[in-house]
Amino acid sequence: MKRLLLGFSRALRHLIPGLILTASISGNAQAATTHGALRMEVMAAPNLVVDSNVESPSSYSPRAAHFGVKITNTGATPLTDIYVKMGNLTNTSTGAGTPGTYPVTTVPAVPAIGYSGTFFFTHEGTAADATRYLPSLAAGASTTVYWLVSYPLKDSNEKSVTAAANVTTDDLRLDYDVWVQATDGVTPRLVYDECHATCRNEISAAAN
């Protein structure tokens, strides 16, 4: 889904003092994690660590995170031809999307925020890595798939994407989608979740 977001919530319109942001979102729901015997659960922390001294040249902040999804077959027969994807889901009916390419968050240049620009996750590895194929999953079995993504720490003017250290509402939020397609007998299944993670001002040593 395409978003024009500052990162506070998924909504069609955000109102901040003196600023209106609009968002265009395709798709019709935010999550459908069970379909027939196919079930998924996203396994990821809600926050991304940005070192409190990231604007200093001496700072070495974390800049990548692992995201995972647990896939479970709750049925009595195997699931087959399972495709597990992470990126930007554009059609929640057909499962069309761009694995490995993530929704863009656009932050306007306003003094109250301090940073600005366009921001998104970067998939580590090739785009093909964002799609994982599992030939089958036995009845009652589960498996977990992980990906590594990196995230921005500063804007083009070297300003931290967490803005004011003592305020959390202006922290950058980055969106990503996870979706799984499988065949349940002869029936196609699709589950998905629209997710996000928020960049937080932290002391790296304490966070790690």
Image (cartoon, grey):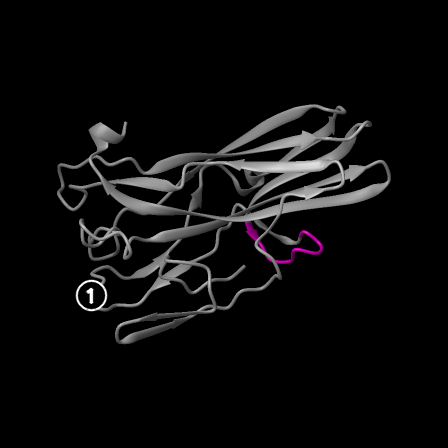
Q: Between 74 and 56, which is closer to the camera in this rendering?
A: 74
The magenta segment is 88-95
Left-right relation of 6 to 115: right
Q: Position of residue 163 (x, y in %)?
A: 21, 54
Q: Between 117 and 179, which is closer to the camera in this rendering?
A: 179
Above or below — where is 24 with respect to 121?
below
Q: Between 8 and 187, which is closer to the camera in this rendering?
A: 8
Q: Residues within 10 Å of mark 1 (few under 14, many from 20)?
A: few
Mark 1 residue element: loop
Residue 197 forms part of the magenta stretch: no
Specify the quadrant of the image occupied by residue 47: top left
Judging by the rendered image, the residue that carries numbered circle 1 is 112
Q: Between 94 and 124, which is closer to the camera in this rendering?
A: 94
Q: Position of residue 45 (x, y in %)?
A: 41, 37
Q: Residue at x 22, y 32 (%)?
A: 204
Q: How many marks?
A: 1
Looking at the figure, which quarter contains the N terminus? bottom right
Left-right relation of 80 to 27: right
Above or below — where is 111 with respect to 84?
below
Q: How would you classify the magenta stretch by its main secondary structure?
A: loop
Residue type (three-letter) at the residue carrying disc 1: Ala
Q: Residue at x 23, y 69 (%)?
A: 110
Specify the quadrant of the image occupied by residue 92: bottom right
Looking at the figure, which quarter contains the C terminus? top left
Above or below — where is 115 with respect to 121?
below
Q: Position of residue 55 (x, y in %)?
A: 16, 46
Q: Residue at x 17, y 37 (%)?
A: 59
Above or below — where is 146 with respect to 10?
above
Residue 91 forms part of the magenta stretch: yes
Q: Position of residue 57 (x, y in %)?
A: 14, 41
